[in-house]
Image (cartoon, rainbow, N blue to C red):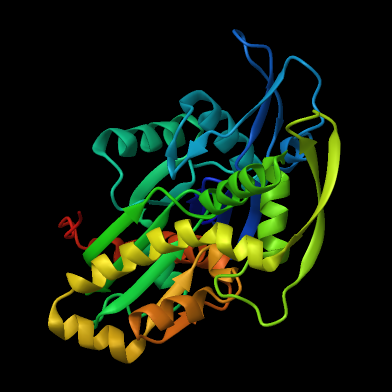
């Protein structure tokens, strides 16, 4: 029956979009990016990976657009265009019914933002079965006992948002959503290099530095790398050396904000569920869960064991895909709003 109405789980992230199709697994992983030509009448030139390859190499008249920002729609029309393109890439056009979709969204998304997501999916050709909190989808995707009367703590650190939640019996008991995550870490590195070295580097370079040298804890054997940018004094191209200690220093501010959200949730978790969290640990998902030492950093500050999921970037889409394949489980997800700030 998948031929008539495919079942799809979607992780609509700030930096990447992932599609899970029932019976096939993860079939699409593309950057959340569109390149258009023109200002008033925008003509779509490239979407996804094709658009990413054009970054920094485009002539005048071309503009890169990130349709999703901080986990919510920043450009409705481009989100619709991007989703329609990805749906066709994921399942083709040889289906009769509109695909059934389960989509993960931040827990503190507003009603207006939620309606915008639903409308964009509908216009792109999908039939949205349910919008589920990202934290619940990520917890399901990493194998936590979401539906049991047991407290499980999930920290999902993506590109634009960080979701922190304690889950029990299919509901978020306490949660906090930060519109700060991997991109904020990139920006912190860019600002550090600008402030300390008087050099301007681009977004991609900032992300590369984070991947190559970033660490949540100071390394005993610092690593070094050469970075190219533009000297802010002369305006000429410049090359400089940066080490992992400098990157570690630059990352402290966003990491402390994420830690603050974790502590906020722990302080408001009911005692019985808090005891469960102490016993089972904190589970990290999302792309930035791969930042070296972030589990040790959180464990040292909270006194609780921290585990990084096996495939942290895939957890949300795997959970959404699981729900899309088992739609009867959606009725067991709590409708009550969790305690939030």
**Which one is nearer the viewer's eye here, 239 or 206?**
239
At a point 24% along the width and 73% down the height, the residue shown is 266
Q: Position of residue 116 (x, y in %)?
A: 36, 32
Residue 248 shows in the view = yes
Q: Position of residue 216 (x, y in %)?
A: 55, 70
Q: Position of residue 246 (x, y in %)?
A: 65, 62
Q: How many marks?
A: 0
At a point 57% along the width and 46% down the height, the residue shown is 187
At a point 17% along the width and 69% down the height, the residue shown is 268
* Quarter location, residue 306: bottom left
Residue 3, placed above or below residue 321: above
Q: From this viewpoint, which residue is outermost toward the bottom?
A: 279
Residue 187, placed above or below residue 80: below
Question: In the rendered view of the protein, which quadrant contains the C terminus?
Answer: bottom left
Q: From this viewpoint, which residue is outermost toward the top?
A: 40
Q: Position of residue 110 (x, y in %)?
A: 27, 39
**Which one is nearer the viewer's eye here, 83 or 233?**
233
Residue 195, placed above or below residue 25: above
In the rendered structure, the answer to whether residue 224 lies left or right of residue 299 reads right
Residue 308 shows in the view = no
At a point 41% along the width and 63% down the height, the residue shown is 256
**Which one is nearer the viewer's eye here, 288 or 127?**
288
Residue 145, placed above or below residue 203: below
């Amino acid at each position: 029956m998948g031929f008539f109405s495919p079942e799809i789980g979607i992780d609509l992230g700030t930096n990447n979009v992932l599609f899970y199709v029932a019976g096939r697994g993860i079939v699409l992983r593309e950057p959340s990016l569109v390149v258009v030509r023109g200002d008033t009448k925008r003509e779509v030139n490239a979407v996804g990976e094709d658009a990413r390859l054009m970054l920094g190499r485009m002539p005048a008249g071309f503009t890169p657009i990130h349709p999703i920002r901080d986990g919510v729609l920043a450009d409705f029309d481009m989100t619709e265009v991007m989703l329609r393109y990805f749906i066709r890439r994921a399942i083709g056009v040889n289906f009769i019914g509109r695909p059934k979709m389960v989509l993960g969204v931040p827990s503190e998304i507003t009603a207006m933002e939620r309606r915008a997501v639903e409308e964009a999916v509908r216009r792109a050709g999908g039939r949205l079965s349910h919008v589920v909190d990202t934290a619940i989808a990520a917890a399901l995707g990493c194998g936590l006992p979401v539906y049991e009367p047991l407290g499980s703590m999930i920290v999902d650190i993506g590109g634009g948002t960080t979701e922190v939640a304690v889950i029990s019996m299919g509901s978020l008991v306490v949660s906090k959503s930060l519109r700060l995550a991997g991109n904020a870490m990139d920006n912190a590195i860019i600002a550090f290099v600008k402030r300390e070295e008087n050099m301007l580097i681009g977004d991609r370079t900032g992300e590369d530095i984070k991947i190559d040298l970033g660490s949540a804890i100071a390394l005993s054997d610092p690593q070094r790398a050469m970075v190219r940018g533009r000297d802010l004094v002369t305006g000429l191209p410049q090359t400089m050396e940066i080490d992992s200690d400098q990157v570690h220093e630059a990352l402290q501010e966003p990491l402390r904000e994420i830690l603050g959200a974790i502590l906020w949730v722990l302080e408001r978790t009911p005692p019985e569920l808090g005891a469960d969290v102490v016993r089972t640990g904190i589970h990290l998902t999302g792309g930035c869960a791969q930042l070296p030492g972030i589990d040790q950093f959180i464990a040292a500050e909270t006194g609780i064991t921290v585990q990084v999921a096996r495939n942290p970037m895939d957890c949300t889409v795997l959970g959404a895909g699981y729900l899309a394949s088992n739609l009867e489980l959606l009725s067991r997800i709590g409708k009550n709003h969790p305690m939030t700030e």
